[in-house]
């Protein structure tokens, strides 16, 4: 890979903005001959110790010859990358290969003021990937002084295979640069930590400036300042106003640049045209993060979008992380922070719920309602236009936030759904995630599959439990935030009103729960407390005047029953003041059985959550559906832990065959023979095929058993010759006549014509993987052979686990037509086709139709595979800031 010239395309390929370990950003690019003065200035501002560590000798200045050597690289034997911010170099890394050795000598130099931010490690990652692409360099070596502990740590923590020895007062390090699981894991960990730290800048600042802190009490800037002071925020707050000496009794400053102390976070409330200049001031003042409350950006149209791009460009230039614009702000109830950086009149309770909202207005409403139902918030973020930081970054923060136990999302769009899927799945493995989504993320296209069902599949597979309304979102959060996660779906209903208990039982079944079959020992223990009438054992009917002792005795017995995962208590008050006694009884029983989920429903005025943490609902159906959704998370979690994604034994063969068929800049369709070879390498059985390109090839076809002849242009579902299909052909002469009939019906475009053995009858199924332009490959299963509409087919977003493949088949329209063994064969086929697309991302369409599914096999009769060049392969596999968020 020797670039003939330093073309802009070559440079752009290796140029990116990247998040550093402190959450800020840096700009990485190849070094250029014009960097001479920047290198000279960089060198001269470093300490004598740093220069000695780099060159092993005092070198206060660099000669012109040295500058020329450092800035001119050939892209093979010599290569260098720089990290820069505001056109000032933050770090330089290079390798030099001497002679014909497959090892290059590597060296780093990080600006003294930017130590500890992971710049050297980042540049090492870039150098390693670049060197691998040369095809010549297999490893690095470095010579490090023992006192240079920082550089020793860089090599140890990089994740690459490293060895070292001490000789002649120097540590000689040898570093393998081939990709390993350890190196990939280390790089991924650094990326995740950096993403999280970017949010820390917003949610855990030590000092805040409010830029645009107006003196008018009704102004947004004034309200933000008032909320910070009312919090009270634990650090200093600095109003910024160009003229006022003070705002709200706090000394003001004319700009961020004139604040004498360090500022971690700026809340920006100035008119949109002024925001870019404010962000530049923040960058020059080393303010790490900015919340842009100001509106008038992309939400207003093209001019606003251009303005937003300018703000982002300035933020990238100076390494400032931006939330918004057009956002409500953030809240962090941690008593060590106490940050209320919004203009909303809300006062959230501290608690364990993390809340993200794309709508500021609805975010404020949710916060207010959460307070009313006793739901505590750990942190809240309204992301607004998501020009820079997004929900994906916030998910990273919540993943490692011990104060956050449940995550709630109000979504209007996903930004980068693939990254969202990866991040939210990781969060959902340790914390329940519930979401309500407004509007259509995508409008249906002509085929009807770019619809809400695809988005629903993404949420379901990644562990997000979707709810229909904000009220339902809060209901489920109250349960998940106060009760242990249910161990299963089996519910016992207890109540003193037969009608209400029946209503509750019906609602539980509708919500996906199962009525528990209480054990005989449990029934014996509660026999004298329950009524024996129109119900069976569950729901458990109590007398209308049942007291606290009755509830306690029955609930104790039920919660101890191993057949019960969840208990729902429905109480209609007998007297006006019996709620308190019943509540105390439920809390005592709950304390004695802390591992079982308990919720209640009281008619009349009641507390939203009992002192013992039992949620109390107004009506049984709301309680039942909240329970059902929490249980749905448990079932996903169990399946996720048990599920595995198939990895093909011959994945390299599949990938090589597919990549060989790619035509740059075009969509290409694999020939029937190559398509079948690809599936065969994946262990998929296809019906053998002979291909006729003209009438002249008929005589060469061997017919040992009845065959079918089909034009590649045949009408889907066709079974007649004029539509392109001839069945049960037994001789060459009959085949010749069949070909004539097909050509007569379809014309010369009928070729190629494939000839296949007839297969035993079964159920025609279509299995298709098609690339969704937003969420990626989507696998669908439905009726095949033209037997029915495929637009309503069951679907899952890849990758698909074995459990996911089973769910996909079970949920398809063909499931009821297949016996258990036939379903098993179809599930295995689904897994393997998903693995094929995982192995070869160039595949944009893979359609098997029909697949003849029987108790003994799932035979793929026809396969179509379309491929396109993967642009991502043109991008080096290095860390870069995803601007599509």
Image: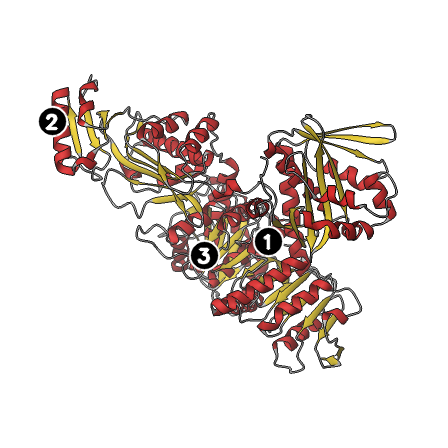
Please rate how many residues cluster around mark 3, counting C-alpha atoms within 10 Å: few if below 14, some from 14 to 19, many from 20. Answer: some
> Can see residue 537?
yes
Q: Where is residue 717? Give x, y as percent.
A: 21, 38
1 or 2: tag closer to the N-terminus: 1
Which quadrant of the figure contains the N terminus?
Answer: top right
Question: Nearest the camera: 489 or 217?
Answer: 217
Q: Which colour assignment does the render follow?
A: secondary structure
Report the residue marked by disc 3. Answer: 467
Point out which mark residue 393 bears.
Answer: 1
Q: Secondary structure at mark 1?
A: helix
Can residue 349 be seen from the camera position used here? Answer: no
**Residue 335: image location, x then y, percent:** 71, 62
- Residue 666 at x, y percent in the picture: 39, 42
User: Tag 2's secondary structure?
Assistant: helix
- Indicate which disc, 3 or 2, sits on the residue closer to the N terminus: 3
Q: Nearer the viewer, mark 1 or mark 2?
A: 2
| Residues marked 1 and 3 touching at CB (< 8 Å) | no
Q: Say whether residue 271 is left or right of residue 61.
A: left
Instruction: Assess whether mark 2 and mark 1 are in contact (beta carbons under 8 angstroms).
Output: no
Provide the residue designation for mark 2: 737
Cα separation, mark 1 vs mark 2, equals 65 Å
């Amino acid at each position: 890979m020797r670039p003939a010239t330093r073309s802009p395309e070559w440079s752009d390929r290796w140029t990116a903005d990247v998040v550093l370990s402190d959450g800020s950003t840096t700009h990485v690019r190849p070094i250029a001959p014009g960097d001479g003065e920047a290198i000279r200035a960089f060198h001269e501002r470093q300490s004598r110790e740093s220069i000695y560590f780099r060159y092993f000798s005092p070198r206060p200045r660099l000669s012109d010859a040295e500058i020329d050597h450092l800035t001119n690289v050939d892209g093979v034997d010599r290569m260098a990358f720089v990290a820069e911010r505001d056109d000032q170099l933050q770090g330089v890394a290079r390798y030099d290969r001497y002679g014909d050795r497959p090892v290059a000598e590597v060296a780093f130099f990080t600006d003294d003021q930017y130590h500890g931010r992971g710049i050297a490690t980042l540049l090492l990652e870039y150098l390693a990937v670049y060197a691998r692409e040369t095809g010549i360099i297999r490893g690095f070596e470095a010579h490090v002084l023992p006192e240079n502990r920082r550089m020793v740590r860089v090599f140890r923590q990089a994740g690459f295979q490293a060895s070292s020895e001490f000789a002649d007062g120097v540590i000689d390090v040898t570093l393998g640069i081939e990709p390993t699981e350890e190196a990939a894991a280390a790089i991924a960990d650094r990326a995740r930590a950096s993403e999280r730290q970017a949010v820390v800048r917003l949610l855990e600042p030590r000092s805040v400036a409010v830029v645009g802190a107006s003196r008018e009490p009704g102004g947004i800037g004034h309200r933000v300042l008032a909320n910070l002071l009312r919090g009270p925020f634990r650090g200093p707050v600095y109003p910024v106003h160009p003229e006022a000496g003070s705002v709200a009794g706090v000394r003001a400053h004319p700009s961020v640049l004139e604040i004498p102390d360090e500022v971690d976070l700026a809340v920006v409330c100035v008119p949109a045209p002024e925001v870019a200049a404010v962000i530049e001031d923040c960058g020059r003042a080393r303010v790490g993060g900015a919340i842009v409350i100001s509106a008038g950006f992309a939400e207003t149209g093209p001019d606003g979008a251009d303005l937003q791009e300018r703000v982002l460009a300035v933020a990238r230039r100076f390494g400032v992380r931006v939330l918004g614009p057009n956002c409500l702000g953030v809240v962090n109830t941690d008593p060590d922070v106490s940050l209320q950086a919004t203009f909303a009149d809300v006062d959230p309770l501290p608690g364990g719920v993390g809340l993200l909202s794309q709508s500021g207005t609805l975010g404020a409403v949710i916060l207010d309602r959460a307070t009313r139902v006793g739901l505590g918030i750990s942190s809240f973020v309204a992301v607004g236009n998501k020009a820079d930081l997004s929900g994906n970054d916030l998910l990273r923060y919540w993943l490692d936030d011990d104060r956050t136990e449940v995550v709630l999302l109000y979504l209007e769009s996903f930004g980068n759904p693939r990254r969202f899927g990866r991040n939210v799945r990781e969060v959902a493995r340790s914390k329940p995630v519930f979401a309500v989504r407004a509007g259509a993320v995508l409008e249906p296209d002509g085929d009807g599959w770019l619809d809400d069902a695809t988005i629903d599949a993404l949420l379901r597979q990644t562990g997000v439990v979707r709810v229909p309304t904000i009220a339902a979102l809060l209901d489920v959060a109250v349960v998940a935030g106060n009760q242990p996660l249910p161990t299963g779906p089996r519910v016992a209903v207890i109540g003193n009103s037969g009608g209400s208990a029946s209503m509750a039982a019906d609602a539980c079944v509708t919500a996906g729960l199962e009525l528990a079959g209480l054990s005989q020992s449990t029934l014996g223990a509660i026999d004298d407390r329950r009524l024996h009438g129109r119900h069976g054992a569950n729901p458990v009917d109590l007398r209308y005047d049942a007291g606290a002792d009755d509830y306690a005795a029955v609930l104790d017995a039920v919660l101890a029953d191993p057949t019960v995962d969840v208990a729902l208590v429905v109480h209609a008050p007998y007297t006006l003041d019996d709620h308190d006694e019943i509540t105390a009884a439920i809390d005592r029983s709950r304390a004695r059985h802390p591992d079982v989920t308990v919720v209640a429903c009281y008619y009349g005025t009641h507390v939203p959550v009992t002192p013992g943490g039992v949620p109390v609902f107004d009506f049984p159906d709301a309680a039942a559906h909240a329970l059902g959704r929490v249980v749905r998370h448990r079932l996903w979690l169990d399946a996720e832990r048990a599920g595995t994604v198939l990895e093909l034994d011959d994945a390299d063969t599949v990938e090589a065959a597919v990549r060989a068929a790619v035509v740059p800049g075009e969509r290409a369709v694999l020939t029937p023979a190559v398509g079948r070879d690809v599936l065969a390498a994946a262990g998929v059985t296809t019906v053998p095929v002979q291909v006729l390109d003209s009438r002249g090839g008929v005589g060469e076809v061997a017919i040992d058993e009845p065959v079918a002849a089909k034009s590649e242009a045949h009408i889907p579902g066709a079974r007649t010759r004029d539509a392109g299909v001839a069945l049960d052909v037994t001789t060459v002469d009959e085949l010749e006549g069949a070909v004539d009939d097909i050509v007569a019906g379809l014309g010369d475009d009928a070729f190629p014509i494939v000839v296949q053995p007839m297969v035993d009858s079964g159920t025609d199924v279509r299995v298709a993987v098609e690339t969704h332009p937003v969420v990626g490959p989507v696998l669908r299963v439905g009726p095949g052979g033209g037997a029915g509409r495929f637009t309503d087919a069951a679907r899952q977003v890849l990758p698909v686990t074995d459990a996911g493949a089973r769910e996909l088949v079970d949920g398809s329209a063909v499931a009821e037509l297949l016996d258990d063994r036939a379903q098993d064969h179809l599930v295995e086929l689904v897994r393997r086709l998903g693995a094929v697309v995982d192995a070869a991302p160039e595949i944009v369409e893979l359609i098997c139709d029909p697949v003849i599914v029987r108790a003994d096999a799932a035979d793929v009769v026809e396969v179509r595979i379309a491929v396109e060049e993967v642009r991502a392969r043109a991008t080096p596999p290095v860390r870069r800031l995803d601007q599509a968020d």
